[in-house]
Image: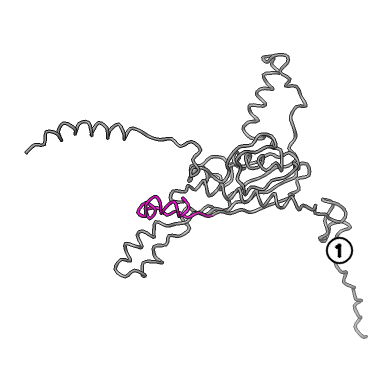
């Protein structure tokens, strides 16, 4: 027997389902979408910065972030992982720390020089104040690099398959979705006037990706596992650079300049043969006179 009441309400239910499926929610500032580089910076002040980020009471000089876009790691970053430049993230971390004042030496320089070209051509207003001597020099250069980034540092499937008898295959399939993402980074701090490296620091980060296991356990279980059920490679790389930068700051807070007797670049202390006065002459063999044969 046809249920006429059901036929009457079915169209309304279907319409409601379609409308609900078209709806979406946007959670601006969601904590799960953030990286380790959080918040903002304005001048010497920072808001909502990572509590673990190192901080300086006074700035130590000006700094430019110099990224080698021809390096192999950069090709992997932008090609394989489809990620962008590391410069914006590092600029945020540096300014939030207040250890250095960031100056632009990247793509923003094109806009800066373009404004100066407009001023010189007479296109800008007379009071635009784009004369010479306005730009600030970079005391230091910070060079980032990624040592390695592993998208799957090891699934757990094989290690647990033998622990559950006949269910081993099922459990291994679930555990195989548990993998870790790792990244290791380096930062080199160079004095631009002398070219001397004043500090270098490694950083690393690792996260667990629970994959399908998190979905099967449910949202509450995934949340209790730390929210790593869908962690992107980019978050791990940002975390590694945050660790690197913290190590740079710790190093410069305890900085003592290296010294060489006689001054830097004046010949060094490791003498080599034939290097002027610094070289050690080779020992000279004494010649012995030949004895004449007896008559």
Name the quarter where the N terminus is drawn: top left
Residue at 63%, 54% (x, y): give it: 202
Specify whether 200 is left or right of 19.
Answer: right
User: How many numbered dots are placed on residues in this image?
Assistant: 1
Instruction: Find the magenta span and give its range.
Output: 206-227
Name the quarter where the C terminus is drawn: bottom right
Q: Which of these two is toward me, 277 or 208?
A: 208
Specify whether 70 is left or right of 172.
Answer: right
Q: Is residue 123 visible?
A: yes
Residue 212 magenta-drawn? yes
Q: Is residue 72 visible?
A: no
Task: Work out whether 115 lies above or below 29.
Answer: above
Task: Work out whether 176 lies above or below 164.
Answer: above
Determine whether the residue tagged by mark 1 lies in a helix, strand or loop.
loop
Residue 118 picture location, percent across and down? 67, 19
Q: Which of these two is toward me, 173 or 276?
A: 173
Residue 266 picture location, percent across and down? 85, 51
Quarter occupied by residue 61: top right
Task: Work out whether 230 lies above or below 173.
Answer: above
Residue beneath disc 1: 280
Residue 63 magenta-drawn? no
- What is the residue that sits farthest to the left in this orientation? 1
Residue 205 picture location, percent across and down? 56, 53
Q: Which of these two is toward me, 162 or 197?
A: 162
Q: Which of these two is toward me, 80 or 31?
A: 31
């Amino acid at each position: 027997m046809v249920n006429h009441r059901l036929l009457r309400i079915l169209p309304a239910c279907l319409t409601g389902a379609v409308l609900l499926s078209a709806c979406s929610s946007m959670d601006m500032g969601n904590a799960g979408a953030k990286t380790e580089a959080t918040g903002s910076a304005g001048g010497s002040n920072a808001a909502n910065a990572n509590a673990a980020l190192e901080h300086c009471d006074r700035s130590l000089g000006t700094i430019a972030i110099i990224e080698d876009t021809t390096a192999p790691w950069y090709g992997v970053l932008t090609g394989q992982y489809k990620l962008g430049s590391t410069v914006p993230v590092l600029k945020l971390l540096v300014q939030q720390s207040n250890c250095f004042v960031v100056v632009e030496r990247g793509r923003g320089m094109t806009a800066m020089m373009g404004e100066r070209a407009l001023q010189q051509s007479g296109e800008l207003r007379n009071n635009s104040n784009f004369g010479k001597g306005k730009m600030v020099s970079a005391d230091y250069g910070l060079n980032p690099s990624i040592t390695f980034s592993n998208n799957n540092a090891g699934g757990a499937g094989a290690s647990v398959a033998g622990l559950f008898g006949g269910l081993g295959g099922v459990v291994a399939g679930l555990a195989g979705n548990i993998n870790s993402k790792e990244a290791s980074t380096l930062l080199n701090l160079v004095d631009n006037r002398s070219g001397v490296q004043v500090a270098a620091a490694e950083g690393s980060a690792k996260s667990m990706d629970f994959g399908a296991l998190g979905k099967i356990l449910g949202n509450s279980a995934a949340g209790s596992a730390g929210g790593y059920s869908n962690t992107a490679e980019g978050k791990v790389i940002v975390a590694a650079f945050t660790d690197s930068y913290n190590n740079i700051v710790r190093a410069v807070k305890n900085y003592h300049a290296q010294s060489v007797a006689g001054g830097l670049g004046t010949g060094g202390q490791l003498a080599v043969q034939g290097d002027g006065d610094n070289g050690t002459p080779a020992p000279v063999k004494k010649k012995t006179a030949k004895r004449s044969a007896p008559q």
